[in-house]
Amino acid sequence: MSGEKIEMRLDKINVEDYDSITSLYHSPFDYNLLYLLCFAKQKRVSIILDDIDNLGVNKEKPAEFYQYQEKYSYSKTKFSNIRALTLTIPKHLLVNLSNPLINLLEERIKISNIKSTFECSDTVEHWIYNLTKKYGVKSLVGPDLSFGYVNINDYKFREAIENTKDDILFLLKKIQPGDYKSNENFVEWLFAFKGNDSTISQYFMDVLDRIIKEFNLQKNVNKIGSMCSNYESGELSALTDVFKRDRLFQMKYIEALKIDNKKKFNLPFYKINKDNGKRTFNVSELKINNKDEIFAPNVFMLSGYDNIVLPMRAHKDSHIIAREILYRSGFIRSNQVFCDDKWTDMIYSYDLNIYLDETECYFYGTNIINLRSMPGIIKNAREKFLYSQDNEEIFKSWVILSTDNALKKNYYPLLFFIMMREKMFCGKSLDIYKIDLV
């Protein structure tokens, strides 16, 4: 965590004490989908699209239009070229180095020795780059615009979705060939465009609505909404007025900045142009100059949402702690909770055969793996990694352990949803926690 340190602990809460849970993310193809399925059979859920944000960006070269691009790392620091937010698909389901455990590999083979150990002709950085590109993921990226105000026909969004869909179908053909036609029909149904004149945000809401109706989740879904719509309705106008005149509120913001010192915004708000989705940061005054602009909160101030559920691993992030400080100030009607979803425990409990491609066969030594066998495979890989004297065995086992890490961090709920449909998570009990700052 950057900036000033703060003591905290996690306290488990009784989810039954909460009227509803809010899933706030960018698209139905990622965490929104996951938490919808996790909670909607047992708890009332509100789904809010974070459409004041972009859909993901290429940090090296910002895209002028929406594309489906390769994501990769550069070095042991794991700096990657893409900020992925919306839709990420692995090239191989069970060989995935999107989150390579470089430090773990260094415990067995020093990074300085990698060149000789793996006969690497270039730098270690290029070795990591090539590996994470070959065994990595592709992700949807685009211009840095609020997708709540971008039409589905603009910036080649439809084309990017079609390219993503093609990759999904290609992957499904390899990992579950017996059900390919059913999967193909399901993918076409899931990604279908209803009309020709709507925003990307509305398209995503249509997809969510389609899922809710198909799997009879209407009873427990409070609403599907968007941050843009909420802030257009005036949620922030009163808050900006309070911030302008309340010194305590301003001091709390300064306190939050010290926790997450990566953010240097003078004010906790920025502007969005409703005509084109362009975002203006570091505004100099809390004043709207024309009717086509709205204020939006920066990362510290997701205002107006109850029980925003986040993955457990996020609770130590500096911007999450900064947000918690502001939420507790009494000025903002929001709070966040954290879900220990035990993701890999759940997917590894399913009796589902995965048919491996040639690349995966090399690492696992078989052409079919049942998901239920993965815990044993991972345990065996860990033992080989620790005790084998064969460099190839060490490398193979490291790739398997890194794949397990990627599944834990990135989930890929869309792929498993396509394969498992309503079997996924129905009736699963999840543990919910809150942060206690001490």
Image (cartoon, rainbow, N blue to C red):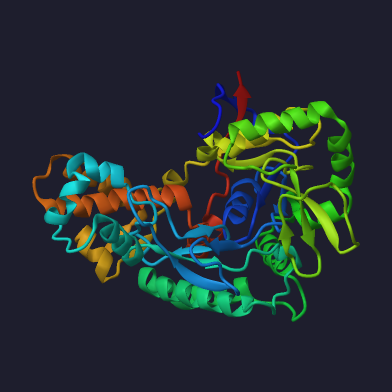
State the residue in front, 248 or 48. Answer: 248
Question: Which residue extends farthest top?
Answer: 438
- The location of residue 92, given as percent across then percent down, is 36, 65
Residue 245 vs 212, above or below: the answer is above
Left or right of 93, for residue 118: left
Q: Residue visible at 57% across and 49% down?
A: 426
Asked whether, in this view, residue 416 is left or right of residue 285, the answer is left
Residue drawn at (65%, 77%), measured in percent from left and top? 155
Image quarter of the C terminus: top right
Name the residue rendered at 60%, 74% in the picture: 64
Q: Is residue 124 left or right of residue 246?
A: left
Residue 4 appears in which quarter of the rendering? top right
Residue 54 shown left or right of residue 304 in the figure: left
At horizontal 79% and vertical 35% (from top left) the residue drawn is 332
| Residue 210 % position (x, y) | 69, 66
The residue positioned farthest toward the front in the image shown = 284
> Viewer-proximal residue, 334 or 188?
334
Can residue 225 be seen at all in this image of the molecule?
Answer: no
With respect to residue 336, does 163 lie above or below? below
Quadrant in which residue 247 is drawn: top right
Q: Residue 7: x percent and y percent?
A: 55, 21
The residue closer to the viewer here, 289 or 108, is 289
